[in-house]
Image: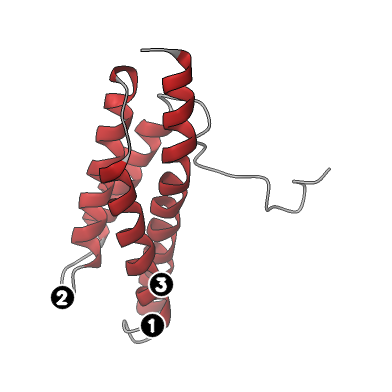
Amino acid sequence: MTDDQITAYVIAAQPYFEDLKQVAAQLAGLLVLEAAGATPDHPMLLSAREAHRNATDGLRCTRVPVRARAHHRHLLSASVYLTEALRAGADPLAPLQHAYADLRAASKLLPGFQMISFEQGCCGNA
């Protein structure tokens, strides 16, 4: 295992981590909309499913060095929980909470995987 292998893994896995975070955020938003009386068949659900599929497929193809295995396991676990949360007719809250927990755990294991991105915020360019 070299630092180059870890760097390559971080570069490869980071977009999939971001996709999983986006899916989780979209599902949380949909839960709020549903609680407010909106229909659960929101167009954002299709977008979340597509991002989830992309992230899952990408993670399965990512070369994982030994030092990144725990990180990768957390990302795959988050993906599984998000699959459950996206399942029609299922209560998405518990699997969504588990997915967030896995994403938080992964974010602590390697650099470049932040749970909160300030780049898009009002102060990101300051």
Identify the residue under disc 1.
42
Q: Where the N terminus falls, by quadrant?
A: top left
What is the crowding at mark 3: few (fewer than 14 residues within 10 Å), some, or many (at least 20)? some
Seen in the picture, residue 72 relative to 122 is either above or below; the reply is above
Bin the neighbour count of mark 1 within 10 Å (Cα to Cα): few under 14, some 14-19, many 20 and up.
few
Compare marks 2 and 3 and give the one earlier in the sequence.
3
* Cα–Cα span, label 2 and label 3: 18 Å
**Residue 68, how many percent across, how many down?**
34, 24
Question: In the rendered structure, which amino acid carries the disc numbered 1?
Answer: His
Residue 112 x %, y %: 53, 32
User: Does residue 46 lie above or below 97 as drawn?
Assistant: below
Element under label 3? helix
Tell which circle, 3 or 1, labels the residue nearer the N-terminal end. Answer: 1
Q: Residue furthest top?
A: 2
Number of marks in picture: 3
Residue lying at 35% horizontally and 46% vertically, measured from the top left = 100
Disc 1 from disc 2: Cα separation = 14 Å
Tell me which residue sits at (29%, 50%) in the image: 97
Residue at 25% of width from left, 44% of height from top? 60
Residue at figure coordinates x 18%, y 75% from the top left: 88
Indicate the position of residue 75 as horizontal and vertical percent values. 31, 40
Among all residues in the image, which is located at the extreme right? 126
Tag 2 secondary structure: loop
Instruction: Give the spatial CA distance, label 3 vs label 1.
Output: 10 Å
| Residue at the spot of label 3 | 47
Q: Name the kind of residue labelled 3 in the image.
A: Ser
The residue labelled by disc 2 is: 89
The residue carrying pointer 2 sits among few (fewer than 14), some (14 to 19) or many (20 or more) residues within 10 Å by Cα, namely few
**In the image, what residue type sits under mark 2?**
Gly
